[in-house]
Amino acid sequence: MTGQLNTSGSPHIPARFSVTKVMGWVLIALIPAIFALLFYFGIGLIVQITLATLAGYLFEWWSLTWRHQPLKPFLTDLTVPVTAVLFALCLSPIAPWYVAVVGMFFAIVVAKHLYGGLGNNIFNPAMVAFATILVAFPQSMSLWLPPTGLTQFGELQTIDWKHTLSIIFVGIQNSDLAVDAVTAATPLTALKTGLQQGFSQSEIVQGMVFGDFGGLGWEWIANWLFLGGLVLLYKRIITWHVPAAVLMTTVAISTPFYLFNADIYMSPQQHIFSGGIMLAAFFIATDPTSGCSSHRGKLIFGAGVAILTVLIRNFGAYPDGVAFAVLLMNLSAPLIDRLTIPKPYGKKGHP
Amino acid sequence: MAELKDRLSTFHGGLVLKHHKELSAGSEVTEVDRPRSLTISLRVNRGHVSEPVVAVGDRVNKYQIIAQPIHPFGVVVHAPYSGTIRAIEERPTAAPDAESAPCIILDTDDRDDATDYMPPLTEFNRQTLINRMREAGILGMGGAGFPTHAKYDHHTQDMETLLIINGAECEPYITCDERLMLDQPEALIKGTDLLMQAATASRAVIAIEDNLGGVKSLLDKTIKQLGLETIDVVKVPTIYPTGGEKQLIKVLTGLEVPSGQTPLSLGIIMQNVATTKAVYDAVEHNRPLTQRLVTVTGDQVGRPGNYLTAIGTPFYHLLALADCPMSEIDKLVVGGPMMGYPMPSADIAVDKTTNCLLLLTADSSKPDLTTLPCIRCGDCVKACPQDLLPQQLFWYIQGDDLEKARDHHVFDCIECGACSWVCPSHIDLVSYYRYAKSELTYQDYKKAKAQLAKQRHENREQRLEDIKAERQAKRRAKTDKLKNKSQAKQEISAVLDRLKNKPKDDGESS
């Protein structure tokens, strides 16, 4: 007979899952899209991911220290790399190094730890970071690279890893490259500026940066993100509610605009396949901490993200509105949650 | 009214668990030898305490009544063996948290004098059967421990009743009900028939999980042999917690027990298979409930299996028989791994609801996991069979906003542990809900008491006020009278007149 039996509470069988595993699967699900981005836009993304992750861990360690929190469980839960990768995916591959660092400061210190750390953040940290730098460094966010496949036309040239590093760490002005020769607008920016200059949509999508059904390269990145999303659904890390609501509402809202005037409003397929809506549908709006908890709440939340995104894209000043749409819906999540408490067993049909 | 549906329904959430039943299901039932002393609890689970009717030093016979209930929801307690009462004292019991309760400690002997405390039934009707359940001290042996006769007492006879025999042992590891169905199909079916008479039910259904091979065909064959075709055997999906009362009713009938009510409100009575067998024993063999099947299983158990154990047998006696070295055991759980209660020591004894002793080493019991903050992942929402929002409940309870937890239906939680198990942050959610429920109940009780006291106080104040007002009114009337001089003069003269006109003989006579 041992001296003391363990009397910790039930259940008495090992847990199924852990936060680390959840976050690990999110990272795994992002791998196909990361490779697609690398293929189309070069090595810069790896640098951005590394920068963001290192900066993220630094800020996490610093925040945990001043908040007197235990270091080990929180530094090993893989939430920092998830935030960092999601944020880096939104960055231009050749954005200057300080963009990633400042963004991660806002993600980890402001959005996460000032609100109480893991599980207590009201806003999605990656989107807070992205929105901040979108406002703070608009110039560097508009400088994207042309996707592979465009450079064969001769007007543009690809840049190798040495040039990538020098642009990120020294600056494009100080390098020996001509800015116009190595950068190109993102499809959504091209569309926005084209429309502002008085071109019609059908003319604009004939342009270089557009592919078969979305932005060139972007359409395939969206497909790989979709695949990653299916992995998360299969592993039951997310439910179908948010992605379905985001994608279906995007189509449902953008179609009437497009039918009303196809010259100035984007087609539903452009909405889905260029820009951030696919990333948002499976990886951003599904963030449980800043989203809704009931199934009905998730549907409303996803639909809200889609409606706001389409409205910002069609009428707003920014080419893409996903980040702002998500942040606005984050604000509404507590209210939606309160209004969508499900009826439990035995109370259905009763007030 | 409640009817069996051709197609089974489903309930929200639930889990598919590794069932580990093969460990103990295969072997034959072992009859446990007589322990030298028994510790018989006078309270089962969260029920009411029975009053001992024997004194220390008394010699009792087998089946003799040793305690009587003082509350309608208490049960009669019998001596499983003949012997001498050594002590009547508070001891930790196999109830949740090993709560202490009065226990009778009985030193057994081998004289085995049995007395017929229950004569054979001469008449079989609803009332005699219910009385027999009461006399035999039968209660829900599936875990709830609710006195069985009380279920039948309460039901109104004009209602069409459906009897459900619960053979869906949804917790992993436990196999005592499965073993009972395999070994004693006839007793079970006959017991079901008796319960149908007690409930005046025209239909009964025995629900078993679909991973039990051979049980359904065996029961079907027995039903045919006995000619009791009003009893059906239905296989239900093996999803934890199908064996929960509310979930099983939903699966079988598609109905939901209204919140805060019992299945009786739907005209349903549910009984565990072990209870059914106990009723059969009480009626056919005139045996009170003094023994039950206990599954002993888990890691390091040399002879896992089912043991026919006398109520009051200490765990260590059973564990020695099952060849279980306690040195390597980290946890001793009464019940299954999802809802069972860890016991602080092996000196505690089996009671009428102890269905399983689960022994776990440190590796396979919950390892020492760090609890992280809730990330609101919603896994608990997906798993909850009651369709609650466990993470919101947790949020409010953690913030001590218990009224919000009530609004989020914390009282509908059945404490099945599904949420705790799936939680990636390893939060012991069920403990929070238990805390909230008991705290809210206590607060309500205090509030009701304060309300009553306030009411009493106000009533008293009102009474004093009334008395005072009455007195004042009288006094005022008197002074008013005196103030009015003309009226006073008139009255005085009237009195004087009366005295003057008095007949003279008045004075003589006095």
Image (cartoon, coloured by chain):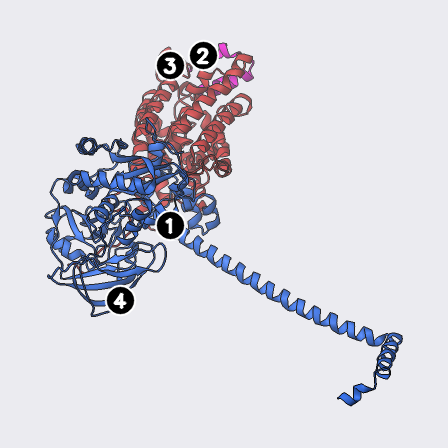
Chain colours: A red, B blue
Residue A55 image point, x, y percent: 36, 40
Q: Which tag is nearer the camera, tag 2 or tag 1?
A: 1
Residue B83 image point, x, y percent: 16, 64
Seen at 75% across and 74% down, the residue is B475
Q: Which tag is nearer the camera, tag 1 or tag 4?
A: 4
Disc 1 residue type (three-letter): Tyr
- Say which mark, if any, is on residue A207: 2
Seen at 45% across and 29% down, the residue is A299
Please give the residue where the numbered disc 3 appears in the rendered image: A150
Q: Is the same chain shared between marks 2 and 3?
A: yes
Residue B206 sits in which quadrant? top left
Badge 2 or badge 3: first in the primary sequence: 3
- Tag 2, which chain? A
Please state if B461 lies on the left or on the right of A135 as rendered. right
Please give the residue where the numbered disc 4 appears in the rendered image: B89
Q: Which tag is nearer the camera, tag 3 or tag 1?
A: 1
The magenta span reads A184-209
- Tag 3, which chain? A
Residue B474 image point, x, y percent: 74, 72
Give the crowd class for mark 4: few <14, some 14-19, many >=20 residues within 10 Å.
Answer: few
Q: Is the same chain shared between marks 2 and 4?
A: no
